[in-house]
Image (tube, helix red, strand yellow):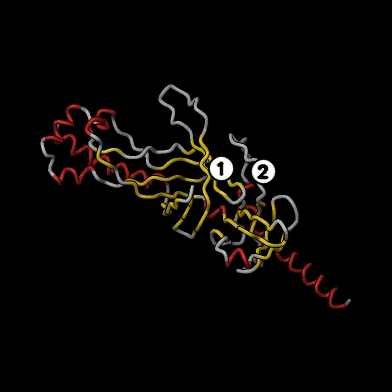
Amino acid sequence: MRNKYITLTFFSLLLLFSVAGCRKSEPTAEVAEPAQEPEFVVKNDSMIYGLVCDGTSDSVIVLWPFSGDPMVLNSIDAKHNGRIIGKLEIGDWTGVLLNGEDSTEVTMAVNLDQLKGTWTYPVMPVMKDLQHMSKRMQRRMMANMPDSVKATYLVPREYGFTLKRHHKAQPVGWIMRSNSLEDDSPVQYPEVKNYKQWYMSNGRLLLISGERPKPGEETKKPNVVDTLDLVFMDTDSLVLMQTGIRYSFHRKQNAIKANEAATKAAEKQDSASNKLR
């Protein structure tokens, strides 16, 4: 009986110290910001969201949920199975999935503060089919365009997204070019998705995108929801999987820096087009 009393006392003290650690970091939590009405409603999400507390280790996660009391959770199997996505730091906004048969065991944890930021991957253009080119560009192609000029066009761009607070997202990869230069270019890049929001649901990342509105028009088509599995994340790398295909991203300083590189690539292409006019 005495041993049982000692064990309960020790567990109570662990929770007390953990709560103290959470309280110290609470002002930096995501929920401290004013809430905004979401455009997208996540249904049937079983993840628990809260702050990582002092006492968290490779085998234990101490989480203070945004609603409820602090939880001491076993994370040994989740760590062994590679289901701890990101490095869990004290005070970080984190989501966890619990074992359906054991509410004290974590099956997956995601550091959502670490997930925020700008993530990109390189995209290469492809040469257009002749039928998709303007008549003028067809004549130029038929005139044996020098390899050095072709190399100018085959410049990679950075595509991706920026995940912000309050579930806001924005695309990375758009550049400003005139329609005439786009038509005359012998290459084409994949379409840039107009990401607008992001959410988590049952351990998966939801990216919501919509049609990019034209000047003076509003988007009327419904939003598209991409559901991606989180495979791996560290400070600079992110691996997502969709329909069995893995996508590797690298962290950028911000969307502006990533788009600057894309703009410089387009300027090289425009310069080559002007020389051929």
- Residue 23 shows in this picture: no
Which of pointers 2 and 1 lies earlier in the amino acid sequence?
A: 2
Going by the image, does 201 lie left or right of 178? right
Say what amino acid the circle numbered 1 marks.
Answer: His
Residue 79 pos. (x, y %): 58, 65
Q: Using the image as rendered, state which of residue 199 and residue 76 is in the foreground.
A: 76
Is 152 drawn above or below residue 109 in the view shown? above
Residue furthest out toward the right: 1
Q: Residue at x 48, y 33 (%)?
A: 210
Q: Write down the residue under mark 2.
A: 44
Going by the image, does 272 lie left or right of 102? left
Say what amino acid the circle numbered 2 marks.
Answer: Asn
Residue 140 pos. (x, y %): 14, 33
Q: Do the residues under discs 2 and 1 have CB atoms within 8 angstroms? A: no
Q: Using the image as rendered, state which of residue 186 and residue 92 is in the foreground.
A: 186
Q: Write down the residue under mark 1.
A: 167
Q: Secondary structure at mark 2?
A: loop
Residue 3 pos. (x, y %): 84, 77
